[in-house]
Amino acid sequence: MLQGFAQFQGPDIVVREERLAEGLAFAAAELGLSALAPARADFSALAAIWDTELEDAARDAYQRDYIGYGFGRWREAS
């Protein structure tokens, strides 16, 4: 993905998920802003409706993303 973007405009910064807080703090400082702590995602609404049928439909609809980004199942069936 970065290679594709770089053909148009190279990124100013690349932040990996495991260093998100540090990367966002750096980017904010570069802009003269105060950094905020990253918000925690609330998946309770998805958990309330999730089932294997929904998971399979999502995988079918977004198969390219699942493959390209290495997505696995959101959670295992119970």
Image (cartoon, rainbow, N blue to C red):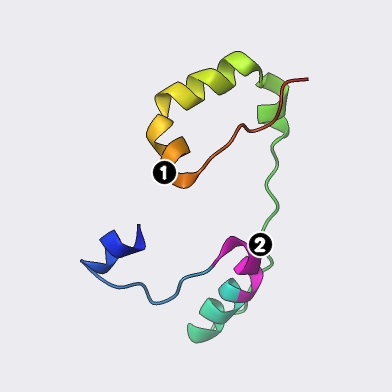
The quarter of the picture where residue 35 lies is bottom right
Q: CA distance from mark 2 to mark 1?
A: 25 Å
- What residue is disc 1 on? 68
Q: Which quarter of the figure has residue 43?
A: top right
Q: Where's residue 63, x and y in %?
A: 42, 30
Q: Is residue 47 above or below residue 37?
A: above
User: Tag 1 or tag 2, which sits nearer the N-term?
Assistant: 2
Quarter of the figure that contains the N terminus = bottom left
Coordinates of residue 37 in the picture (x, y in percent): 69, 67
Mark 1: which secondary structure? helix
Which residue is located at x 46 percent, y 71 percent?
14
Q: Is residue 18 magenta?
A: yes
Q: Quadrant of residue 48?
A: top right
Task: Looking at the picture, tell me which residue is in the foreground, 10 or 67.
Answer: 67
Residue segment shown in magenta: 16-22
Please determine whether, in this image, residue 67 is positioned above or below residue 19. above
Q: Which residue is mark 2?
A: 38
Which secondary structure class fits the magenta region best? helix
Name which residue lies at 42% across and 30% down: 62
